[in-house]
Amino acid sequence: MDDTKLDQLLHSLRKRPVHTERLLGFEGRTMAILRQRAEEPAVFFIAWRLAPMFLALLLALGGWMYAIATPPANLHFTALGSGHEEVQMVHYITGD
Amino acid sequence: MDSAEAGIPDEQLIEQVRAGNGAAYEELIRRHKQKIFYMAARIARDPLELEEIAQEVFVKAYEKLASYRGEAPFGHWLARIATNTCYDYLRKRKQRRVEVPIDLHEWALEAQTETHGTEPEELAALARALERLRPDDRMVLTLLELEEKSVKETAYIMDISEGNVKVRAHRARKALKELLEKELDHG
């Protein structure tokens, strides 16, 4: 393959017609894409701004659920102080 | 052009876009779309892909408009974005090993009407050889040989030195010749 032949082929390729039918209304379609993309970040922005509120709500809910679900950790000590230690021991041994 | 923005220099339109005037950007697209279409057509395989590439160029340009300093004409700056976008397309194609058959019949018809003394099979072989070329080799050849850009313009668009353009062009031509010979041998 010599350079002249390659140049001739490249010249032919250069002259190949371009599909220009999609040029019509191209700017309108592109602007529609830009508008769509401009709206998408707004949704993300709002979600991002609301994230701390959701986090606080989640923590509060978690804390509340923990508070109502956890048995008093100092149950045995309470029993000692109130004179119910024997009853408490029976419960502990029998698994009640 | 019948819009209010017609006749205003590109730089003023850019200022208007920065100030939030969408119509000004629409006018910029209207002015430069044909050039970008012709550039993207060197890479695209069909009209839909051609529009997809051209749209991506203008979307990227819009997003990067804040970084445009006016050191080069807007058209040149846009051509740089177009080249990078085309390059990305070629790279993705190579990574995915997308093999879309080139419409030989269309090529043959075009060759019969548009070329002189070139066999349709040779043009089809050239198209296949270009598809097999490395993306950066193809880009440098596209700009120099098909878009008929100067070495200086190519250097600006590809963001490399003029010496580098010459070296890459020489390497790319050599690679293209080898690939083309193989394509012609295989028929």
Image (cartoon, coloured by chain):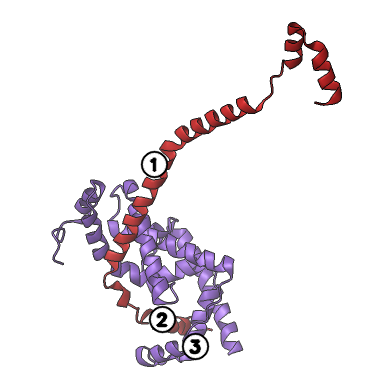
Chain colours: A red, B purple
Determine which residue is flagged by label 1: A46
Q: Is residue A83 above or below residue A51?
A: above
Q: Is residue B179 visible?
A: yes
In the picture, the disc for residue A13 is 2
In the figure, is residue B152 to the left or right of B124?
left
Give the quarter of the image for residue A81. Answer: top right
Q: Amino acid at mark 1?
A: Ile
Q: Give the class, few, some or many, for how many residues have Cα within 10 Å of label 1's Cα (few <14, many ≥20).
A: few
In the figure, is residue A76 to the left or right of A34?
right
* In-front residue for pair B43/A73: A73
Q: Quadrant of the C terminus of chain A?
A: top right
Position of residue A49 measured from the top left corner of the image (x, y, whole percent)? 41, 37
| Subunit of label 2 | A
Q: What's the distance in space between the residues labelled 2 and 3, CA to CA?
A: 10 Å
**Along the polypeptide, which appears first: circle 1 or circle 2?**
2
* In-front residue for pair A70/B99: A70
Determine which residue is flagged by label 3: B122
Give the quarter of the image for residue A15. Answer: bottom left
Q: Does the CB distance between marks 1 and 3 fall below 8 Å?
A: no
Q: Is residue B33 above or below residue B127?
A: above
Q: Is residue B63 above or below residue B103?
A: above
Q: Quadrant of the N terminus of chain A?
A: bottom right
Q: Amino acid at mark 2?
A: Leu
Residue at screen point 57% across, 78% down: B179
Q: Nearer the viewer, mark 1 or mark 2?
A: 1
Position of residue B5 measured from the top left corner of the image (x, y, whole percent)? 16, 58
Q: Amino acid at mark 3?
A: Glu
Residue at screen point 72% across, 11% down: A78
Q: How many marks?
A: 3
